[in-house]
Amino acid sequence: MPNPSLVVAVLAFAVAVHGQVMTGGVMTQDPSKPSFMEKAWKAAVTLNQQSNLKYLMVPIKVLKADSQVVGGMKYNFEILFGQSECNKGDVELSELATSNCQLIPNGSRAVYKVELYERLWENFEQYTVSKIKDVAAGEKI
């Protein structure tokens, strides 16, 4: 039979730390935060710089988001991108978010993993983008 004092102590500790954030631990975030869509547009610049596609890809939706404190902030996202009507080279990538590039209804779509490392006090952002999978135009995500 367990010692009742020990059980009470363990339960009290569990209640005290419930909801606390472990420093350096990965925190699940709400992917619908508007600031994450802003980061998705910035990630689109990196994606389009790396791609050989004729048309520019634009973010449709942030599907997953998490963050971690690591000498700055590290974010991991899964973002659905879609083919826009804008030809690569016709739009400055630095102006992509405000260029009004419309999504092609049956254009190609794909989910990408986006890693962002930022140190705001140094005005530093580094995006790494890699494709996870292609998504059919009518496929629900």
Image: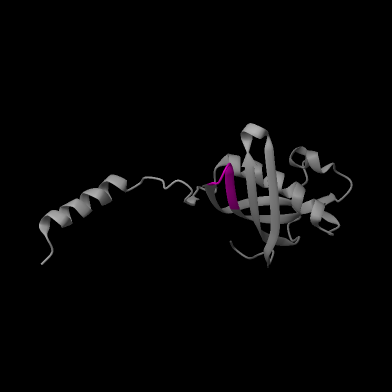
Q: Which residues are magenta?
A: 69-76
Return the residue nearer the eye: 33 or 123. 123
Magenta: predominant secondary structure element?
A: strand
For this view, does 88 lie left or right of residue 19?
A: right
Question: Which of 85 and 110 lies nearest the eye of the viewer?
Answer: 110
Q: Is residue 84 visible?
A: no
On the question of residue 115 being in view, the answer is yes
Lateral position of residue 56 relative to residue 34, left or right: right
- Residue located farthest toward the right when viewing the structure as drawn: 89
Residue occupying image coordinates x 79% and y 52%:
48
Q: Quadrant of the C terminus?
A: bottom right
Q: Is residue 13 above or below residue 123?
A: below
As for residue 99 lying within the magenta part, the answer is no
Say left or right for 66 vs 53.
left
- In this view, 134 is above or below 69: below
Quadrant of the rendering where the N terminus is positioned: bottom left
Q: Is residue 34 above or below residue 88?
A: above
Residue positioned 79% across, 38% down in the render: 95
Question: To which quarter of the image does residue 82 belong?
Answer: bottom right
